Amino acid sequence: MKLISALLMLISVTVFVLPAAAQNDTLAPELEVFRPFLNKVWRGELQAQQQGKTSIDYSLWQRALNGQAIKVVHSVNNGEYGGESIIFWDKSKKSLAYYYFTTAGFYTHGTMQYDATSGKLTAEEKVENNANGITMVRSTSVLKEQQLLTSSEYLQKGQWVKGHAATYTESKDGKVVFQ
């Protein structure tokens, strides 16, 4: 009788618990491109518009909303600035879409297109409530397995200006910090 009880317990665990555990890392198919970046802290040296000024950005990428979104939190210079993004597949637009909220009080929303051949992600976003007159951002990111290369430009007071550029690599000891 004890053997039968033990076998039934083992079968129950196998049938009910293991499938649930296996599903914990599922992603919407359109988000699979981001899988190599998940659950890691990434360090980037931001080369800004100001000559010679470098800032350090740490970001953490995580699966969110049962795999229907990617959540990215980041902080620059130990919390001097930071933000949180939610990336998801917008079915009506048939595009990757995102919202980005910042510690500076502005937010953005936009869409991204991924080219699997080049590994390039192009994004365009509308900026809301920016104190510096930035109303749009265009960016390009190249996704490689061990690094992420980014560059951007801003529409500021009606003129496109060079934004930041960075190369991100995995950081074993970096942390996202908010003040």
Image (cartoon, rainbow, N blue to C red):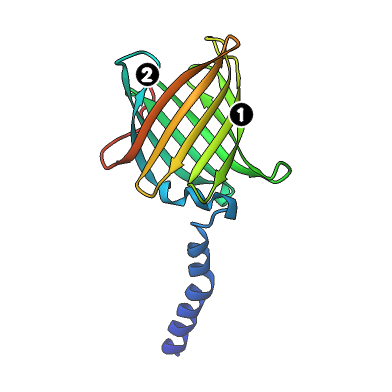
| Closer-to-camera residue (119/130) | 119
Q: Position of residue 73 (x, y in %)?
A: 45, 34
Q: Position of residue 99 (x, y in %)?
A: 58, 31
Where is the C terminus found, in terms of image quarters?
Answer: top left
Q: Residue furthest left?
A: 173
Against 179, is 25 above or below? Answer: below
Q: Residue at x 49, y 57 (%)?
A: 25
Against 60, is 132 above or below? Answer: above
Where is the N terminus found, in terms of image quarters?
Answer: bottom left
Q: Position of residue 48 (x, y in %)?
A: 38, 19
| Closer-to-camera residue (54/89) | 54
Answer left or right for 73 relative to 88.
left
Answer left or right for 80 relative to 10.
left
Query: How much space separates mark 2 and mark 1, taking CA atoms?
Result: 22 Å
Q: Residue at x 56, y 10 (%)?
A: 133
Against 16, is 135 above or below? Answer: above
Image-quadrant location for residue 151: top left
Image-quadrant location for residue 157: top right
Which is in the foreground here, disc 2 or disc 1? 1
Q: Residue furthest right?
A: 92
The tag on residue 80 is 2
Answer left or right for 42 relative to 70.
left
Q: Amino acid at mark 1?
A: His
Query: Which of disc 1 and disc 2 is earlier in sequence?
Result: 2
Residue at the disc numbered 1: 109
